[in-house]
Image (cartoon, helix red, strand yellow):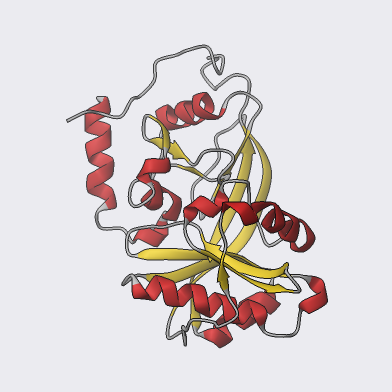
Amino acid sequence: MSVRARWEAERSSSRGRHPLDNPAYASLTGPHAHFAERRGRVLRYPVDMAPWLALPDDPDAYDWADVAELAGPGQEIVLAAFSGEIPAGWDVTFDMEGVQLVDDGLAAAPDPEAVRLGPADVPEMLALVERTRPGPFLPRTIEHGTYLGIRRGGALIAMAGERLHPPGWTEISAVCTDPDFRGEGLAARLTLAVAHGVRTRGETSFLHAHAGNTGAIRLYESLGFRLRRRTRFVGARVPERLGDGQVVGSGGDSLREPTG
């Protein structure tokens, strides 16, 4: 099958699918397309922005070859909301069960204490993430969308913001509070404030959580999120050679995006 035929087949098959079934792919072919690094049908965010690599639905051997060339031999790839199988010969570095929750009646509202965070705040945001471990947050993650924070005594003590952006949807992410200030409801307030901004654009909020983080899931459900589906987050390491013996990074044929 030609590159164009494969691309058109993928576009046709994905039209009937929900954007949240493959949210990273929907984001990088939609509102976040200007961030996408592409090889063939495989896309990813810049590595200093997000770890997510996005595959089309039902990827074939050509797509996995493009994953290997895009990431490079020995590099780890991270797949969000993944439902497929990792090819033989690729080492799985983690396979984590997660949940996907969607807005089902959030009492979204602005927060009078929340301030918009910008590039100058990134060092403090990275330090807060280091203390709280809410999930991936990198030097350029703030470019995904709006991030709000709460300060006390001038110090950033809590934040939340936007990440994946499939058409019509925005993921709320990096929700975290300094351990010294937990129990004040700051995470809930910031989540609702970010959701308010999402709603004013005519979009709907969603989020992901580790399935084992039952405390956070209960909090989100109490705010008005509901479970949409269970999913997986998978990491895998690119092998030095693919199944056909091709050396990764040897400059093999690339499946480029069709033009026209």
For the C terminus, which image quadrant? top left
Residue found at x 22% / y 31%: 5
Report the residue that reaches farthest toward the left.
Answer: 260
Q: Is residue 2 in view from this perspective? A: yes
Q: Is residue 80 above or below residue 35?
A: below
Residue 198 in picture, x, y percent from top left: 41, 71
Residue found at x 24% / y 54%: 15
Q: Is residue 122 above or below residue 99?
A: above
Residue 23 in picture, x, y percent from top left: 43, 55
Q: Is residue 136 in view from this perspective? A: no
Q: Is residue 42 left or right of residue 119?
A: left
- Counting labels gives 0
Examine the image and state in which quarter residue 131 appears.
Answer: bottom right
Q: Is residue 171 left or right of residue 220?
A: left
Q: Nearer the viewer, residue 48 or 124?
A: 124
Examine the image and state in which quarter residue 105 appears.
Answer: bottom left
Residue 170 in picture, x, y percent from top left: 43, 64
Examine the image and state in which quarter residue 151 appears.
Answer: bottom right
Q: Nearer the viewer, residue 206 or 152?
A: 152
Residue 12 in picture, x, y percent from top left: 22, 46
For the N terminus, which image quadrant? top left
Q: Is residue 5 above or below residue 16?
A: above
Q: Is residue 98 left or right of residue 169?
A: right
Residue found at x 56% / y 14%: 247
Report the residue that reaches farthest toward the right.
Answer: 180
Residue found at x 24% / y 40%: 9
